Amino acid sequence: MCNSDSIRVNDPALLPIREKVLAGQPLAFTDGVALYGSRDMHGIGRLANFVREKLHGDRTYYNRNRHINYTNVCALSCKFCSFYRKRGEEGAYEMPVEQVIAMARKASDAGATEVHIVGGLHPWLKFDYYLDMLRGVRRECPRLHIKAFTAIEIIHLGRISRQSVRDTLIALREAGLGSLPGGGAEIFDDRVHDEVFKGKVRADRWFEVHRTAHSLGIPTNATMLYGHVERVEERVGHFIKLRELQAESLAAIETQCGETDTASIGSSSNAAAFNCVIPLSFIPEYSELGHLPGNTGLTDLKTLAITRLMVHNIAHIKAFWIMQGIGLSQIALNWGCDDLDGTVVWYDITKAQGDGTHQELHVRDIQRLIREARRTPVERDTLYRPVLRDATTGRVMGMKLDVGTRMREQVDEPAQQAVPPLATPPTRAERH
Ligand code: V47
Protein backbone atom coordinates (compact mmCIF):
# COMPACT_ATOMS: atom_id res chain seq x y z
CA MET A 1 0.00 0.00 0.00
CA CYS A 2 1.39 3.48 -0.90
CA ASN A 3 2.11 6.07 1.70
CA SER A 4 1.53 9.60 0.51
CA ASP A 5 5.20 10.65 0.79
CA SER A 6 6.12 8.11 -1.85
CA ILE A 7 3.75 9.67 -4.40
CA ARG A 8 6.48 11.61 -6.16
CA VAL A 9 5.85 13.64 -9.30
CA ASN A 10 8.69 15.13 -11.34
CA ASP A 11 6.63 17.47 -13.50
CA PRO A 12 5.91 20.72 -11.59
CA ALA A 13 2.61 21.01 -13.52
CA LEU A 14 1.41 17.91 -11.62
CA LEU A 15 2.07 19.32 -8.15
CA PRO A 16 -1.36 20.98 -7.67
CA ILE A 17 -2.98 17.80 -9.03
CA ARG A 18 -0.98 15.74 -6.55
CA GLU A 19 -2.29 17.89 -3.70
CA LYS A 20 -5.90 17.33 -4.81
CA VAL A 21 -5.39 13.60 -5.27
CA LEU A 22 -3.86 13.22 -1.80
CA ALA A 23 -6.69 15.29 -0.32
CA GLY A 24 -9.28 13.15 -2.12
CA GLN A 25 -10.64 16.11 -4.08
CA PRO A 26 -12.17 15.74 -7.56
CA LEU A 27 -9.92 16.93 -10.37
CA ALA A 28 -11.03 19.75 -12.67
CA PHE A 29 -11.26 19.69 -16.48
CA THR A 30 -7.99 21.63 -16.68
CA ASP A 31 -6.30 19.02 -14.46
CA GLY A 32 -7.31 16.28 -16.89
CA VAL A 33 -5.87 18.25 -19.80
CA ALA A 34 -2.67 18.93 -17.81
CA LEU A 35 -2.30 15.21 -17.06
CA TYR A 36 -2.56 14.41 -20.76
CA GLY A 37 -0.02 17.16 -21.52
CA SER A 38 2.51 15.85 -19.00
CA ARG A 39 5.35 13.51 -19.95
CA ASP A 40 5.82 12.40 -16.35
CA MET A 41 4.41 8.92 -16.96
CA HIS A 42 5.67 7.56 -13.66
CA GLY A 43 4.25 10.50 -11.73
CA ILE A 44 0.84 9.98 -13.35
CA GLY A 45 1.08 6.26 -12.64
CA ARG A 46 1.95 6.83 -8.99
CA LEU A 47 -1.02 9.17 -8.55
CA ALA A 48 -3.43 6.72 -10.21
CA ASN A 49 -2.00 3.85 -8.19
CA PHE A 50 -2.50 5.84 -5.00
CA VAL A 51 -6.23 6.20 -5.76
CA ARG A 52 -6.48 2.57 -6.84
CA GLU A 53 -4.90 1.31 -3.63
CA LYS A 54 -6.92 3.67 -1.47
CA LEU A 55 -10.09 2.18 -2.96
CA HIS A 56 -9.12 -1.45 -3.36
CA GLY A 57 -5.79 -2.16 -1.74
CA ASP A 58 -4.16 -4.98 -3.71
CA ARG A 59 -7.45 -6.53 -4.74
CA THR A 60 -7.69 -7.16 -8.47
CA TYR A 61 -10.93 -8.40 -9.89
CA TYR A 62 -11.69 -10.74 -12.73
CA ASN A 63 -14.78 -12.68 -13.63
CA ARG A 64 -15.66 -15.89 -15.37
CA ASN A 65 -17.79 -14.73 -18.22
CA ARG A 66 -18.65 -15.30 -21.82
CA HIS A 67 -19.31 -12.61 -24.42
CA ILE A 68 -22.03 -13.52 -26.93
CA ASN A 69 -22.62 -11.36 -30.02
CA TYR A 70 -26.01 -12.59 -31.23
CA THR A 71 -25.88 -10.69 -34.54
CA ASN A 72 -23.51 -8.51 -36.52
CA VAL A 73 -26.25 -7.13 -38.76
CA CYS A 74 -26.60 -3.44 -37.99
CA ALA A 75 -28.62 -0.56 -39.36
CA LEU A 76 -25.76 1.80 -38.46
CA SER A 77 -22.43 2.22 -40.26
CA CYS A 78 -20.10 3.65 -37.62
CA LYS A 79 -16.71 4.36 -39.13
CA PHE A 80 -14.76 2.87 -36.24
CA CYS A 81 -16.62 -0.45 -36.36
CA SER A 82 -15.32 -3.46 -38.25
CA PHE A 83 -17.97 -5.73 -36.75
CA TYR A 84 -21.15 -4.70 -38.55
CA ARG A 85 -22.50 -6.23 -41.75
CA LYS A 86 -25.46 -5.25 -43.84
CA ARG A 87 -28.35 -7.64 -44.36
CA GLY A 88 -27.40 -10.22 -46.99
CA GLU A 89 -23.73 -9.21 -46.99
CA GLU A 90 -21.15 -11.98 -46.80
CA GLY A 91 -20.44 -12.86 -43.18
CA ALA A 92 -23.71 -11.38 -41.88
CA TYR A 93 -25.29 -13.58 -39.22
CA GLU A 94 -27.96 -13.69 -36.58
CA MET A 95 -28.07 -16.50 -34.06
CA PRO A 96 -31.27 -18.34 -33.38
CA VAL A 97 -32.39 -17.81 -29.79
CA GLU A 98 -31.68 -21.50 -29.08
CA GLN A 99 -28.05 -21.02 -30.06
CA VAL A 100 -27.61 -18.11 -27.66
CA ILE A 101 -29.22 -20.15 -24.89
CA ALA A 102 -26.99 -23.15 -25.66
CA MET A 103 -23.87 -20.95 -25.54
CA ALA A 104 -24.98 -19.48 -22.22
CA ARG A 105 -25.63 -22.97 -20.83
CA LYS A 106 -22.21 -24.13 -21.93
CA ALA A 107 -20.61 -21.13 -20.26
CA SER A 108 -22.60 -21.69 -17.08
CA ASP A 109 -21.67 -25.39 -17.02
CA ALA A 110 -18.01 -24.38 -17.37
CA GLY A 111 -18.28 -22.13 -14.31
CA ALA A 112 -19.15 -18.70 -15.73
CA THR A 113 -21.19 -16.36 -13.53
CA GLU A 114 -22.00 -13.85 -16.28
CA VAL A 115 -22.93 -13.64 -19.94
CA HIS A 116 -22.33 -10.38 -21.78
CA ILE A 117 -24.76 -10.27 -24.71
CA VAL A 118 -24.66 -7.51 -27.32
CA GLY A 119 -25.19 -7.22 -31.05
CA GLY A 120 -25.89 -4.80 -33.89
CA LEU A 121 -29.14 -2.88 -34.41
CA HIS A 122 -30.82 -5.63 -36.35
CA PRO A 123 -33.45 -4.24 -38.74
CA TRP A 124 -35.98 -7.06 -38.59
CA LEU A 125 -35.63 -9.10 -35.41
CA LYS A 126 -38.76 -8.60 -33.31
CA PHE A 127 -38.84 -7.56 -29.67
CA ASP A 128 -39.98 -11.10 -28.79
CA TYR A 129 -36.64 -12.42 -30.02
CA TYR A 130 -34.87 -10.47 -27.28
CA LEU A 131 -37.42 -11.39 -24.61
CA ASP A 132 -37.24 -15.07 -25.60
CA MET A 133 -33.45 -14.92 -25.46
CA LEU A 134 -33.45 -13.49 -21.95
CA ARG A 135 -36.21 -15.80 -20.70
CA GLY A 136 -34.49 -18.82 -22.18
CA VAL A 137 -31.12 -18.03 -20.59
CA ARG A 138 -32.83 -17.27 -17.29
CA ARG A 139 -34.78 -20.56 -17.43
CA GLU A 140 -31.78 -22.71 -18.38
CA CYS A 141 -29.18 -20.95 -16.21
CA PRO A 142 -31.00 -19.33 -13.29
CA ARG A 143 -27.76 -18.32 -11.53
CA LEU A 144 -26.10 -16.74 -14.52
CA HIS A 145 -26.12 -12.93 -14.49
CA ILE A 146 -27.26 -11.50 -17.82
CA LYS A 147 -25.48 -8.28 -18.71
CA ALA A 148 -26.95 -7.33 -22.04
CA PHE A 149 -27.67 -4.66 -24.63
CA THR A 150 -25.88 -1.35 -24.93
CA ALA A 151 -27.82 1.89 -24.52
CA ILE A 152 -28.11 2.12 -28.31
CA GLU A 153 -29.68 -1.32 -28.51
CA ILE A 154 -32.10 -0.38 -25.72
CA ILE A 155 -33.23 2.67 -27.72
CA HIS A 156 -33.59 0.46 -30.80
CA LEU A 157 -35.66 -2.07 -28.82
CA GLY A 158 -37.84 0.77 -27.52
CA ARG A 159 -38.45 1.87 -31.10
CA ILE A 160 -39.37 -1.58 -32.41
CA SER A 161 -41.64 -2.32 -29.44
CA ARG A 162 -43.07 1.22 -29.42
CA GLN A 163 -42.30 1.69 -25.77
CA SER A 164 -40.48 4.28 -23.71
CA VAL A 165 -36.93 3.55 -22.58
CA ARG A 166 -38.29 2.96 -19.09
CA ASP A 167 -40.95 0.45 -20.17
CA THR A 168 -38.44 -1.30 -22.44
CA LEU A 169 -36.03 -1.73 -19.55
CA ILE A 170 -38.81 -2.95 -17.26
CA ALA A 171 -39.89 -5.56 -19.83
CA LEU A 172 -36.30 -6.72 -20.35
CA ARG A 173 -35.66 -6.89 -16.63
CA GLU A 174 -38.79 -8.99 -16.13
CA ALA A 175 -37.45 -11.34 -18.80
CA GLY A 176 -34.08 -11.73 -17.03
CA LEU A 177 -31.85 -8.72 -17.74
CA GLY A 178 -29.53 -8.05 -14.81
CA SER A 179 -27.41 -5.08 -15.90
CA LEU A 180 -26.32 -3.05 -18.91
CA PRO A 181 -22.82 -3.12 -20.38
CA GLY A 182 -21.04 0.15 -21.07
CA GLY A 183 -20.88 0.07 -24.86
CA GLY A 184 -22.06 2.66 -27.34
CA ALA A 185 -20.69 5.59 -25.36
CA GLU A 186 -17.75 6.20 -27.73
CA ILE A 187 -16.91 9.89 -27.05
CA PHE A 188 -19.57 12.19 -25.67
CA ASP A 189 -18.97 15.03 -28.07
CA ASP A 190 -21.01 16.29 -31.02
CA ARG A 191 -18.00 17.05 -33.22
CA VAL A 192 -16.66 13.52 -32.86
CA HIS A 193 -20.16 12.08 -33.16
CA ASP A 194 -20.75 13.82 -36.48
CA GLU A 195 -17.40 12.75 -37.86
CA VAL A 196 -17.30 9.11 -36.81
CA PHE A 197 -20.68 7.73 -35.73
CA LYS A 198 -23.21 10.15 -37.14
CA GLY A 199 -26.07 7.65 -37.44
CA LYS A 200 -25.93 6.83 -33.75
CA VAL A 201 -28.01 8.64 -31.15
CA ARG A 202 -26.20 11.45 -29.38
CA ALA A 203 -24.77 11.43 -25.87
CA ASP A 204 -27.96 12.76 -24.26
CA ARG A 205 -29.84 9.58 -25.26
CA TRP A 206 -27.02 7.32 -24.00
CA PHE A 207 -27.29 9.12 -20.67
CA GLU A 208 -31.09 8.90 -20.71
CA VAL A 209 -30.86 5.10 -20.91
CA HIS A 210 -28.26 4.80 -18.15
CA ARG A 211 -30.06 7.33 -15.93
CA THR A 212 -33.33 5.45 -16.37
CA ALA A 213 -31.64 2.11 -15.70
CA HIS A 214 -30.14 3.48 -12.50
CA SER A 215 -33.52 4.82 -11.40
CA LEU A 216 -34.94 1.31 -11.85
CA GLY A 217 -32.14 -0.28 -9.83
CA ILE A 218 -30.36 -1.70 -12.88
CA PRO A 219 -26.58 -1.22 -12.55
CA THR A 220 -24.62 -0.29 -15.66
CA ASN A 221 -21.08 0.16 -16.96
CA ALA A 222 -19.55 2.93 -19.04
CA THR A 223 -16.96 2.86 -21.82
CA MET A 224 -14.90 5.42 -23.70
CA LEU A 225 -13.55 4.62 -27.15
CA TYR A 226 -10.31 6.58 -27.56
CA GLY A 227 -7.53 6.89 -30.08
CA HIS A 228 -9.39 7.80 -33.29
CA VAL A 229 -10.30 11.40 -34.18
CA GLU A 230 -11.00 12.76 -30.69
CA ARG A 231 -8.84 15.34 -28.89
CA VAL A 232 -7.66 14.99 -25.31
CA GLU A 233 -10.10 17.75 -24.28
CA GLU A 234 -12.94 15.60 -25.59
CA ARG A 235 -11.74 12.60 -23.56
CA VAL A 236 -11.61 14.72 -20.43
CA GLY A 237 -15.09 16.11 -21.17
CA HIS A 238 -16.27 12.49 -21.47
CA PHE A 239 -14.94 11.66 -17.99
CA ILE A 240 -16.62 14.68 -16.49
CA LYS A 241 -20.01 13.82 -18.00
CA LEU A 242 -19.71 10.28 -16.63
CA ARG A 243 -18.94 11.40 -13.14
CA GLU A 244 -21.82 13.92 -13.23
CA LEU A 245 -24.36 11.16 -13.83
CA GLN A 246 -22.62 9.00 -11.25
CA ALA A 247 -22.94 11.78 -8.67
CA GLU A 248 -26.68 12.00 -9.43
CA SER A 249 -27.14 8.25 -9.18
CA LEU A 250 -25.13 7.94 -5.97
CA ALA A 251 -27.19 10.76 -4.45
CA ALA A 252 -30.36 8.83 -5.32
CA ILE A 253 -28.92 5.69 -3.70
CA GLU A 254 -28.00 7.68 -0.64
CA THR A 255 -31.52 9.03 -0.37
CA GLN A 256 -32.93 5.53 -0.63
CA CYS A 257 -30.42 3.62 1.46
CA GLY A 258 -28.81 6.26 3.60
CA GLU A 259 -25.34 5.35 2.41
CA THR A 260 -22.86 6.41 -0.30
CA ASP A 261 -21.46 3.05 -1.05
CA THR A 262 -20.26 3.03 -4.64
CA ALA A 263 -18.95 -0.51 -4.47
CA SER A 264 -22.26 -2.18 -3.67
CA ILE A 265 -24.37 -0.27 -6.09
CA GLY A 266 -26.23 -3.24 -7.40
CA SER A 267 -27.64 -4.13 -4.05
CA SER A 268 -30.44 -1.59 -3.81
CA SER A 269 -33.62 -2.70 -5.53
CA ASN A 270 -34.65 0.64 -7.01
CA ALA A 271 -31.50 2.71 -7.29
CA ALA A 272 -28.22 1.83 -8.92
CA ALA A 273 -25.21 3.49 -10.50
CA PHE A 274 -22.19 2.77 -12.67
CA ASN A 275 -20.14 -0.24 -11.60
CA CYS A 276 -17.06 0.46 -13.67
CA VAL A 277 -15.47 2.42 -16.49
CA ILE A 278 -13.85 0.58 -19.39
CA PRO A 279 -11.57 2.72 -21.58
CA LEU A 280 -11.49 0.96 -24.96
CA SER A 281 -8.39 1.38 -27.07
CA PHE A 282 -9.43 1.92 -30.70
CA ILE A 283 -8.29 -0.86 -33.04
CA PRO A 284 -8.24 0.60 -36.58
CA GLU A 285 -7.75 -2.62 -38.58
CA TYR A 286 -10.58 -3.48 -40.99
CA SER A 287 -12.61 -0.39 -40.05
CA GLU A 288 -13.26 2.65 -42.24
CA LEU A 289 -10.67 4.40 -40.09
CA GLY A 290 -8.07 1.78 -40.94
CA HIS A 291 -5.66 4.49 -42.09
CA LEU A 292 -5.31 5.79 -38.52
CA PRO A 293 -2.28 4.62 -36.56
CA GLY A 294 -4.08 3.40 -33.41
CA ASN A 295 -2.86 3.94 -29.86
CA THR A 296 0.62 3.43 -28.51
CA GLY A 297 1.30 1.63 -25.23
CA LEU A 298 2.03 4.90 -23.48
CA THR A 299 -1.24 6.48 -24.62
CA ASP A 300 -3.12 3.40 -23.41
CA LEU A 301 -1.41 3.43 -20.04
CA LYS A 302 -1.84 7.17 -19.63
CA THR A 303 -5.53 6.99 -20.54
CA LEU A 304 -6.20 4.16 -18.09
CA ALA A 305 -4.40 6.09 -15.32
CA ILE A 306 -6.15 9.37 -16.14
CA THR A 307 -9.52 7.60 -16.14
CA ARG A 308 -8.80 6.48 -12.56
CA LEU A 309 -7.82 10.01 -11.60
CA MET A 310 -10.65 11.89 -13.30
CA VAL A 311 -13.55 9.55 -12.55
CA HIS A 312 -13.15 9.60 -8.80
CA ASN A 313 -16.68 8.43 -8.01
CA ILE A 314 -16.90 5.22 -10.03
CA ALA A 315 -15.35 2.42 -8.03
CA HIS A 316 -13.73 0.25 -10.69
CA ILE A 317 -11.57 0.84 -13.76
CA LYS A 318 -11.34 -2.11 -16.08
CA ALA A 319 -8.38 -2.87 -18.33
CA PHE A 320 -10.21 -4.94 -20.97
CA TRP A 321 -7.38 -7.25 -22.00
CA ILE A 322 -8.92 -8.05 -25.38
CA MET A 323 -8.43 -4.46 -26.51
CA GLN A 324 -5.55 -3.27 -24.33
CA GLY A 325 -3.63 -6.48 -24.82
CA ILE A 326 -2.73 -8.95 -22.08
CA GLY A 327 0.71 -7.50 -21.32
CA LEU A 328 -0.38 -3.89 -21.07
CA SER A 329 -3.45 -4.82 -19.01
CA GLN A 330 -1.16 -6.53 -16.53
CA ILE A 331 1.00 -3.41 -16.22
CA ALA A 332 -2.15 -1.29 -15.88
CA LEU A 333 -2.90 -3.08 -12.60
CA ASN A 334 -0.28 -0.75 -11.11
CA TRP A 335 -1.52 2.25 -13.09
CA GLY A 336 -5.01 2.73 -11.72
CA CYS A 337 -6.85 -0.38 -12.90
CA ASP A 338 -8.33 -2.94 -10.51
CA ASP A 339 -10.20 -5.19 -12.96
CA LEU A 340 -9.25 -7.32 -15.98
CA ASP A 341 -12.75 -8.31 -17.20
CA GLY A 342 -12.83 -12.04 -17.59
CA THR A 343 -12.35 -15.24 -19.45
CA VAL A 344 -14.37 -13.84 -22.43
CA VAL A 345 -14.07 -17.01 -24.63
CA TRP A 346 -14.89 -15.28 -27.88
CA TYR A 347 -14.97 -11.61 -28.88
CA ASP A 348 -16.32 -10.67 -32.29
CA ILE A 349 -16.50 -6.91 -32.11
CA THR A 350 -12.86 -6.34 -32.96
CA LYS A 351 -12.29 -9.78 -34.49
CA ALA A 352 -14.69 -9.63 -37.40
CA GLN A 353 -12.05 -11.28 -39.57
CA GLY A 354 -11.56 -13.85 -36.79
CA ASP A 355 -9.38 -16.76 -37.80
CA GLY A 356 -9.40 -18.80 -34.62
CA THR A 357 -7.08 -16.38 -32.80
CA HIS A 358 -6.96 -17.17 -29.12
CA GLN A 359 -9.57 -15.05 -27.39
CA GLU A 360 -9.90 -16.81 -24.08
CA LEU A 361 -7.88 -16.52 -20.92
CA HIS A 362 -7.99 -19.41 -18.50
CA VAL A 363 -8.71 -18.55 -14.89
CA ARG A 364 -5.28 -19.78 -13.84
CA ASP A 365 -3.65 -17.50 -16.42
CA ILE A 366 -5.61 -14.51 -15.20
CA GLN A 367 -4.61 -15.33 -11.63
CA ARG A 368 -0.97 -15.70 -12.64
CA LEU A 369 -0.99 -12.32 -14.43
CA ILE A 370 -2.46 -10.68 -11.35
CA ARG A 371 -0.12 -12.37 -8.85
CA GLU A 372 2.92 -11.54 -10.97
CA ALA A 373 1.85 -7.87 -10.78
CA ARG A 374 1.96 -8.32 -6.98
CA ARG A 375 -1.79 -8.05 -6.63
CA THR A 376 -4.37 -10.32 -5.06
CA PRO A 377 -6.75 -11.98 -7.53
CA VAL A 378 -10.41 -11.87 -6.52
CA GLU A 379 -13.00 -13.59 -8.66
CA ARG A 380 -16.01 -11.29 -8.69
CA ASP A 381 -19.55 -11.51 -9.96
CA THR A 382 -21.02 -8.75 -12.12
CA LEU A 383 -21.73 -6.63 -9.03
CA TYR A 384 -18.15 -7.01 -7.74
CA ARG A 385 -19.08 -9.40 -4.96
CA PRO A 386 -16.30 -11.95 -4.45
CA VAL A 387 -17.38 -15.38 -5.68
CA LEU A 388 -16.99 -18.30 -3.30
CA ARG A 389 -16.29 -21.65 -4.93
CA ASP A 390 -16.10 -25.13 -3.56
CA ALA A 391 -12.36 -25.82 -3.31
CA THR A 392 -12.72 -29.31 -4.79
CA THR A 393 -15.38 -29.02 -7.47
CA GLY A 394 -15.03 -25.33 -8.37
CA ARG A 395 -18.82 -24.95 -8.11
CA VAL A 396 -20.11 -21.54 -7.06
CA MET A 397 -21.18 -21.68 -3.42
CA GLY A 398 -22.34 -18.08 -3.23
CA MET A 399 -21.14 -14.52 -3.09
CA LYS A 400 -19.20 -13.08 -0.22
CA LEU A 401 -21.35 -10.13 0.77
CA ASP A 402 -19.14 -8.54 3.37
CA VAL A 403 -16.06 -7.95 1.26
CA GLY A 404 -15.83 -5.27 -1.35
CA THR A 405 -18.91 -3.48 -0.10
CA ARG A 406 -17.01 -0.69 1.62
CA MET A 407 -14.56 1.28 -0.44
CA ARG A 408 -11.80 1.52 2.14
CA GLU A 409 -12.12 -1.94 3.62
CA GLN A 410 -9.16 -4.30 3.45
CA VAL A 411 -9.70 -7.70 1.93
CA ASP A 412 -8.35 -10.92 3.31
CA GLU A 413 -6.36 -13.17 0.99
CA PRO A 414 -8.90 -15.27 -0.91
CA ALA A 415 -8.67 -19.03 -0.41
CA GLN A 416 -6.93 -20.92 -3.18
CA GLN A 417 -9.64 -22.09 -5.52
CA ALA A 418 -9.66 -25.22 -7.57
CA VAL A 419 -10.89 -23.94 -10.87
CA PRO A 420 -11.50 -26.23 -13.80
CA PRO A 421 -10.42 -24.65 -17.09
CA LEU A 422 -13.08 -23.41 -19.47
CA ALA A 423 -13.56 -25.15 -22.77
CA THR A 424 -10.93 -24.74 -25.48
CA PRO A 425 -11.78 -21.68 -27.59
CA PRO A 426 -13.85 -22.69 -30.60
CA THR A 427 -12.76 -21.91 -34.11
CA ARG A 428 -14.92 -19.47 -36.01
CA ALA A 429 -16.64 -22.32 -37.83
CA GLU A 430 -17.39 -24.22 -34.61
CA ARG A 431 -18.87 -21.18 -32.97
CA HIS A 432 -21.99 -20.94 -35.18
O1 V47 B 1 -19.38 0.47 -28.08
C1 V47 B 1 -16.16 -1.02 -31.63
C2 V47 B 1 -16.15 -0.57 -29.16
C3 V47 B 1 -17.76 -1.32 -27.79
C4 V47 B 1 -14.04 -1.00 -32.00
O2 V47 B 1 -19.52 -3.21 -20.01
C5 V47 B 1 -14.25 -0.84 -30.65
O3 V47 B 1 -18.17 -4.65 -19.10
C6 V47 B 1 -11.98 -0.71 -30.28
O4 V47 B 1 -18.84 -1.95 -24.74
N1 V47 B 1 -11.73 -0.83 -31.59
C7 V47 B 1 -18.45 -2.56 -27.32
N2 V47 B 1 -13.23 -0.70 -29.78
C8 V47 B 1 -17.63 -3.26 -26.23
C9 V47 B 1 -18.05 -2.85 -24.87
C10 V47 B 1 -17.52 -3.55 -23.67
C11 V47 B 1 -16.40 -4.34 -23.74
C12 V47 B 1 -15.96 -4.98 -22.59
C13 V47 B 1 -16.63 -4.87 -21.39
C14 V47 B 1 -17.77 -4.07 -21.35
C15 V47 B 1 -18.54 -3.96 -20.07
C16 V47 B 1 -18.22 -3.39 -22.48
O5 V47 B 1 -16.62 -1.72 -28.55
C17 V47 B 1 -18.48 -0.38 -28.71
C18 V47 B 1 -17.32 0.41 -29.27
O6 V47 B 1 -17.02 1.49 -28.44
N3 V47 B 1 -15.57 -0.84 -30.45
N4 V47 B 1 -15.24 -1.13 -32.59
C19 V47 B 1 -12.71 -0.98 -32.48
N5 V47 B 1 -12.45 -1.10 -33.78
Image: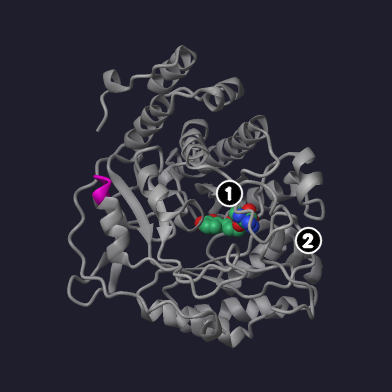
Q: Mark 1: give few (<14), some (14-19) or many (20+) Cα within 10 Å.
A: many
Q: Quadrant of the N terminus?
A: top left
Disc 1 is placed on an element classified as strand
Q: Which mark is residue 118?
A: none
Q: Which residue appears at 28% of the width and 39% of the height?
A: 57
Secondary structure character of the magenta stretch overall: loop
Residue 268 sits above or below residue 424 on the image? above
Q: Which residue appears at 42% of the width and 19% of the height?
A: 18
Instruction: Give whichever of 10, 309 is nearer the camera.
Output: 10
Tell me, what colour scheme is on the image?
one colour
Res 218 seen here: no
Q: Distance of mark 2 from mark 1, alpha carbons?
A: 19 Å
Q: Which residue appears at 80% of the width and 65% of the height?
A: 159
The residue carrying mark 2 has its beta carbon less than 8 Å from ligand 1: no
* Amino acid type at image mark 1: Thr
Q: Which mark is residue 223?
A: 1
Q: Where on the picture, by quarter, is residue 131?
A: bottom right
Q: Is residue 377 magenta?
A: no
Instruction: Give whichever of 246, 85 is nearer the camera.
Output: 85
Q: Residue 16: where, in percent of width, then height?
A: 47, 13
Instruction: Give whichever of 2, 98 is nearer the camera.
Output: 2
Q: Which residues fall within the magenta stretch?
A: 372-376
Read off the residue under disc 2.
Answer: 77
Q: Quadrant of the C terminus?
A: bottom right
The residue carrying mark 1 has its beta carbon less than 8 Å from ligand 1: yes
Q: Residue 357: where, in percent of width, then height?
A: 48, 70
